[in-house]
Amino acid sequence: MHRRIMRDTRSATRRRLLGGAAIAAVALTATLQVQAQDSSPLGVDAEQWTPDYIRSIAGTVEVDTAQECSKVVPLDYEGRVTFWYVGPNEASPQREHESYEAFWKAFAETYPNITVEAQNLGYNDMLNKLRTAALGGAAPMAARLPILWGVEFAAKGQLAQFGPTDVGYPVEEFWPGAMKSVTWKGDTYGIPTNNETMALIWNAGIFEEAGLDPESPPATWDDLVEYSRQIKEKTGKNGYGLVARVNAGNTPFRFMPMAWANGGGALDEVEPNPTYEQIYIDNEGTRKAVQEMVDMYVRDKSVPTSALTNTNDENMDPFTAGNLGMMIAHPSAYASIVDRANKAQGSDKEIAQKVTENMRYGLIPKGTEQRAVVFGGSNFHVFKDEVVDGDVDMQAVEALACVLTGPEWSTRLYFATSNPGNLRGFKTKWNGERLEQIKFLDVTSSMLPSGVPFPVVPESTEIMNIIVPEMLQNALTGKMTVEEATADAERKIQELMGGI
């Protein structure tokens, strides 16, 4: 066991003065300020955060990571940190591998006396390995986890209280939705590293064929239902790539934005300050969203009949073949379809290339209450001493967190895969490079203020991947009415969460 290195005087003093509850209150107040106003130079305004605005701010700030982090941990500090993360694999693009190599090289140059023992684990392996390690007292000091995973470890009491201010960054430099994802029962237990949202993709050629404006996506979910119907009636092609498969993340990622937009939800996750003690699955907004799904699948038959077993992967081929009008996907979908077009042969190749020319990205539609989209990404977490093999070298951890979550590397490290978690990252020259190289990135980035994280509760995966899809299946197959399906889902959530 190595000797525990305590936090510097700055951190210790701050904790004595504030205490856990006060720290949480400060974080909550800052989050509300970001949501309520844009007077702060670091704040964001959802109405202002347009593709044009995002492009206009790129390259407007200079960042000196070493100088900023030296205020948190001296650059000559000697220490050690163990760190687990999901990183690039053999299937990842070369650019992603190069980004990680550049990051680790930069950290070593910034903190040459800190030894980093990093493990890049596969997405499908890391969660169970981390559970086992923490249970056996062999967890890493820190880890970067997908946005939903952290709450499980926080609920088990295995994570340390740790937030942006611990590494010198104001809470206002991070999206309110991202801060929700690292908050458990009023305490902050992580720092957002990167965030992403999806967008609506449509085929302008099919729109024109159906008599729709090829450059104007549906503004509301009601419009999307109507566009889907019109595409089916006018062209015989499926209008929208609906998915409703059970135990597949694609389903809640496409249904929950409909529910949230109409004032619904699973719990109260859409609210500015959710308690996760109220169930919204059986309210009017969620029922409206389910009804819209039923209208497309049952009444209009304007979506794939295989939607009950489809993930969005099954939408890619018909979209590439020019047989699907609209779907919801990441910006990476454009590159994937270009790749499919390049691999196609004969007449299929000509059709696929035409689709790529007609491919458009737009905002996810609004509902009766707002515009919403699932807020994804990852967070940096610190494990408590008692679940780590040895004591946590907190200053070494803080140094790594400062570099990783700052405006430079929260932009450069996720160059082609996500967006900076630190808002200042959008103002750097590196984000300008991203906007020039990644088509439609400005559109998907503009959805971030509308992002809503899934409920930050340990039961969230069961709710989103099982209960919500089963609700949709019950309604789409006619096994239950919409009202019966949402009521059944509410009962299941109540049982799962101990009768809230």
Image (cartoon, helix red, strand yellow):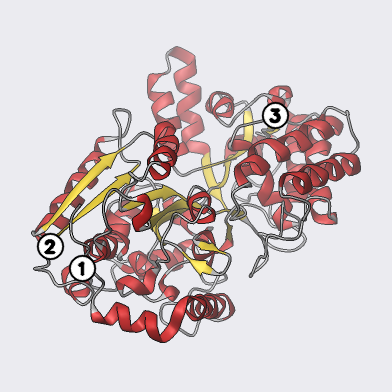
Choose the circle earlier in sequence order: 3 or 1: 1
Q: Amino acid at mark 3?
A: Asn
| Left or right: 41, with 390 as reference point | right
| Left or right: 137, with 392 as reference point | right
How far is mark 3 from mark 1, CA to CA? 49 Å
Picture quadrant of residue 301: top right
Find out whether the residues at labels 1 and 2 contact each other: C-beta distance under 8 Å.
yes
Q: Secondary structure at mark 2?
A: helix
Picture quadrant of residue 486: top right
Q: Which residue is mark 2?
A: 110
Residue 238's tag is: 3
Q: Which residue is mark 1?
A: 65
Choose the circle earlier in sequence order: 1 or 2: 1
Q: Residue at x 83, y 38 (%)?
A: 295
Residue nearer the viewer, 268 or 218: 268
Q: Position of residue 129 (x, y in %)?
A: 39, 36
Q: Is residue 368 above or below residue 343?
A: below
Q: Amino acid at mark 1?
A: Thr
Residue 420 visible at all? yes
Residue nearer the viewer, 456 or 481: 456
Q: Residue at x 59, y 37 (%)?
A: 250
Q: Secondary structure at mark 1?
A: helix
Q: Could you tell me which quadrant the C terminus lies in?
A: bottom right
